Amino acid sequence: MSKKKHIKRYSRRVPLFDVGRVEFHKDRDQMRAGMDMVSGLDDSDKDLSHSAGCCVYGAWDGTDFVWFVGVFDGKVGTIGLECFHATVRILSQVGVPIQKDAANETAAYLLGWLVETFHEVSQENKK
């Protein structure tokens, strides 16, 4: 009998809005395993083999919406890119538009929080 692999789940509640949580992953297998634990995703969402990173969103685990943010190449640019996707999708979920020629403080704050949190999770993951 094979031993079941432990799934590391680094999850944080979305600030400002009570809409769910974000899971942060640096490992493709761990992210797939986390995605297997929620509904609303099809197999095409789980094909991470050629991705430097990805943002899969809106999955329902019975309690919360879950946005998955994965960065697999460790690059700062990829962290920013995937956190931007998550920002846009979370704000869309709660009905906050991103406006042309505006400060978009809510979006800026959320993006900053996502990047900072991914960095913190990356440090926790090294321990």
Image (spheres, grey):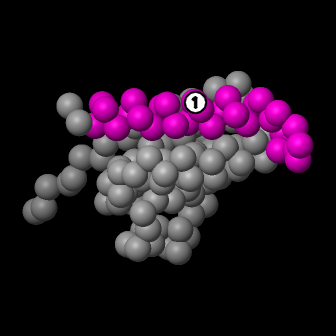
Q: Quadrant of residue 17?
A: top right
89 vs 115: above or below: below
Q: Could you say where residue 55 lies in the image, as x and y percent from the top left?
A: 55, 56
Q: Residues within 10 Å of mark 1 (few under 14, many from 20)?
A: some
Q: Nearer the viewer, residue 9 or 3?
A: 9
Q: Could you say where residue 57 lies in the image, as x and y percent from the top left?
A: 61, 54
The three-letter code of the residue at mark 1 reads Trp
Region of the chain picked out in magenta, as a range: 96-125
Q: Is residue 69 visible?
A: no
Q: At 87% from the left edge and 37% from the top edge, which residue is drawn?
A: 102
Q: Is residue 41 visible?
A: yes
Quarter in which the C terminus is drawn: top left
108 vs 52: above or below: above
**Secondary structure predominantly adopted by residues drawn in magenta:** helix
Q: Nearer the viewer, residue 63 or 11?
A: 11
Quarter in which the N terminus is drawn: bottom left
Question: Residue beneath label 1, please?
Answer: 113
SS state under label 1 = helix
Q: Could you say where residue 43 lies in the image, as x and y percent from the top left?
A: 50, 73
Left or right, 36 with respect to 123, comes to: right
Question: Given the current orientation, which residue lies at the most extreme top position?
Answer: 16
